[in-house]
Image (tube, rainbow, N blue to C red):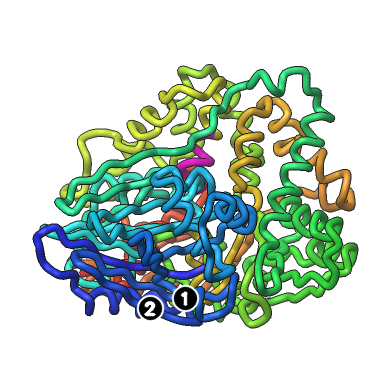
């Protein structure tokens, strides 16, 4: 796990090495164990290393295969690297390290752009061909590892985080009105390729981009599962699906134990993280390190679920660690969390993940986490409503259920120069759901949730917060083979038992019933949800600052109404509207964006 950066020039000039070094320096938290820089012709690559596999200096990056004329930088982990190394050896390749980075290099040498289809894992890759001057960029199937792009006349820069690109300089930091529409409509999610900044884009998940020396490029989308019922699963009953899901999840969890350092688990006490602990215990893991975080209660709202995480820890005899965070620390911790955000993220648990990651990073360098199960297996309470319509009506129903507010309402929120004359967010959802390969209304919704909303909210949140402390988070519920299986699973089995029915059935075979049948919990942060005084002061300062007034995103009367009664203004989904507005402004100010 690491951070990468680089530049390719199209105007005949040499890459700006100093800019690449600045980008690499901004990525230091992602890779505290080493750094490197490489340049040849029009391409420069930078890297920060977190040592997880092959801890020797031979595995440092950028890594070059001189015989093949290839150099790459790589962020992520290839879980099947050992099997691939043996396969590639059988095809005549020699290896000088035991790293997964070298496997990526040899895989590209053997299979060209199709190398990604052989990789099981999470990854962002930048690979330079010495002879042709071609640059190849690739991102994993579910977008677990980020890759940001900033194009300007004569060059393209890329990095693992958006702030790293800002450190390089020369980025157009004006706001993208379409992305702002998405932010205000879709629970602060801005789908790839956009970001809130007009000058920064994201390589979409499951995409290989080949960039030619003249600046032209072509994209190949190499993976997208069908959300349809498939013939190979015909005849399977509920028990068969339960067993298939449990077996696939066991494989996913086992894969993510590959490391040359210890691996722990982020344990909330919910079904998903508890399943990971249970399956690791079945695999014979002893003294497994588990970690939980809780927050001080605020306005009568409880801020921890320790009773459940303690139950799991006792049952499986883990080496358990707890962190209780007082409310007065949330506002100060917020600053660090926002600085770690590549994009503004309003979910309350972002601060929780940042604080928890700080604790965990002192004990281990790798953890498994339960993110993704709700989207993959239909665990949220709004999915039955999405299923209760026909396929053609799903985009409209999705907007009603999921969106923060209707398009028309933005006229009283945004200043006129940021308003669009069309509902860009609704159009995005309609286009995504119209793509063939989703059989029912729920299939279409889950495909959008898993391959769009999940990528640019929970997955990005976990990557940003953990990697800011040099902690690698692995997400077995986003194993691509498990996602393919879940996509084919009949919707009624996922919706059963209040949601995640097939996963709950699997859980009952290995977990205490109190964990499987408990009410669904979230990562509660009462100090933010209830706008505790320190957080409210931080919000007021940000929105009344000269930079906020000069930027002029939001109407003054709307902001005044929010500040007057913050608890009374909620989005359609119940989120605090003031927090959504303030977080965007806090993020822009934190990252020095005027």
Q: Which SS class for mark 2?
A: strand
Q: Position of residue 310 (x, y in %)?
A: 83, 67
Binning the other alpha carbons within 10 Å of mark 1 as few (below 14), some (14 to 19) or many (20 upward) gives: many
Residue 8 belongs to magenta span: no
Label 2 Cα neighbours within 10 Å, binned few <14 / some 14-19 / many ≥20: some
Check if mark 1's residue and mark 2's residue have beta carbons within 8 Å. yes
The foreground one among 57 and 89 is: 89
Residue 184 rendering spot, x and y as whole percentages: 36, 48
Question: Between residues 426 and 493, which one lies in front from this camera angle?
Answer: 493
SS under mark 1? loop
- What residue do we see at 44% from left, 63% from top? 74
Boundaries of the magenta span: 447-456
Please name the residue that numbered disc 2 is placed on: 36
Q: Is residue 550 left or right of residue 180?
A: left
**Spatial distance from mark 1 to mark 2, Cα to Cα?**
8 Å
Q: Which residue is mark 1?
A: 60
Residue at image coords 27%, 41%: 218
Image quarter of the C terminus: bottom left
Q: Is residue 566 left or right of residue 244?
A: left
């Amino acid at each position: 796990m690491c951070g990468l950066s680089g530049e390719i020039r199209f105007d005949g000039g040499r890459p700006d090495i100093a800019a690449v070094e600045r980008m690499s320096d901004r990525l230091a938290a992602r890779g505290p164990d080493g750094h490197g820089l490489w340049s040849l012709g029009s391409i420069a690559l930078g890297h920060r290393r977190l040592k997880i596999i092959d801890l020797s200096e031979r595995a440092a990056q950028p890594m070059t295969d001189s015989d093949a004329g290839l150099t790459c930088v790589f962020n992520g982990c290839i879980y099947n690297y050992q099997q691939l190394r043996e396969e590639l050896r059988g095809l005549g390749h020699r290896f000088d390290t035991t790293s997964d980075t070298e496997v990526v290099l040899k895989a590209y040498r053997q299979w060209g752009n199709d190398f990604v289809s052989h990789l099981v894992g999470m990854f962002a890759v930048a690979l330079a061909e010495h002879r042709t001057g071609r640059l190849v960029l690739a991102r994993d199937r579910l977008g677990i590892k980020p890759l940001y792009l900033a194009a300007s006349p004569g060059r393209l820069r890329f990095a693992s985080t958006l702030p790293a690109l800002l450190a390089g300089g020369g980025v157009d930091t004006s706001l993208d009105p379409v992305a702002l529409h998405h932010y205000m409509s879709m629970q602060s999610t801005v789908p790839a390729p956009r970001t809130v900044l007009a000058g920064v884009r994201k390589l979409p998940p499951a995409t290989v981009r080949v960039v030619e020396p003249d600046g032209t490029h072509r994209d190949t989308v190499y993976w997208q599962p069908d959300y349809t019922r498939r013939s190979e699963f015909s005849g399977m009953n509920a028990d068969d699906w339960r067993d298939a899901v449990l077996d696939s999840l066991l494989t996913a969890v086992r894969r993510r134990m590959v490391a040359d350092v210890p691996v722990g688990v982020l344990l909330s006490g919910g079904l998903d993280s508890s399943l990971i602990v249970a399956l690791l215990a079945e695999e014979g893991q002893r003294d497994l390190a588990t970690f939980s975080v809780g927050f001080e209660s605020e306005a009568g709202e409880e801020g921890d679920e320790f009773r459940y995480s303690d139950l799991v820890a006792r049952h499986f005899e883990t080496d358990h660690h707890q962190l209780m965070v007082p409310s007065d620390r949330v506002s100060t911790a917020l600053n660090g969390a926002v600085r770690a955000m590549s994009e503004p993220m309003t979910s309350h648990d972002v601060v929780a993940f940042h604080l928890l990651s700080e604790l965990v990073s002192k004990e281990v360098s790798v953890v498994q986490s339960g993110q993704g199960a709700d989207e993959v297996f239909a665990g949220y309470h709004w999915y039955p409503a999405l299923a209760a319509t026909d396929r053609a009506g799903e985009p409209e129903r999705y907007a009603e259920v999921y969106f923060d507010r209707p398009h028309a309402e933005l006229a009283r929120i945004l200043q006129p120069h940021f308003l669009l004359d069309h509902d860009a967010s609704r159009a995005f959802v309609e286009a995504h759901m119209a793509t063939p390969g989703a059989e029912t209304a729920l299939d279409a919704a889950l495909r959008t949730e898993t391959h769009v909303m999940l990528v640019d909210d929970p997955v990005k949140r976990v990557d940003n917060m953990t990697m800011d402390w040099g902690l690698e988070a692995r997400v077995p519920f986003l194993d691509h083979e498990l996602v393919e299986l879940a996509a084919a699973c009949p919707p009624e089995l996922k919706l059963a038992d209040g949601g995640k029915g097939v996963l709950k059935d699997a859980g009952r075979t290995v977990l205490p019933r109190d964990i499987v049948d408990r009410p669904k919990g979230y990562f509660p942060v009462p100090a933010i949800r209830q706008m505790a005084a320190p957080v409210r002061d931080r919000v007021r300062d940000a929105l009344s600052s000269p930079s906020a007034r000069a930027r002029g995103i939001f109407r003054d009367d709307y902001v005044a109404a929010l500040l007057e009664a913050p608890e009374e203004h909620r989005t359609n989904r119940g989120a605090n509207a003031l927090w959504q507005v303030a977080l965007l402004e806090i993020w822009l100010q934190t990252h020095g964006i005027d």
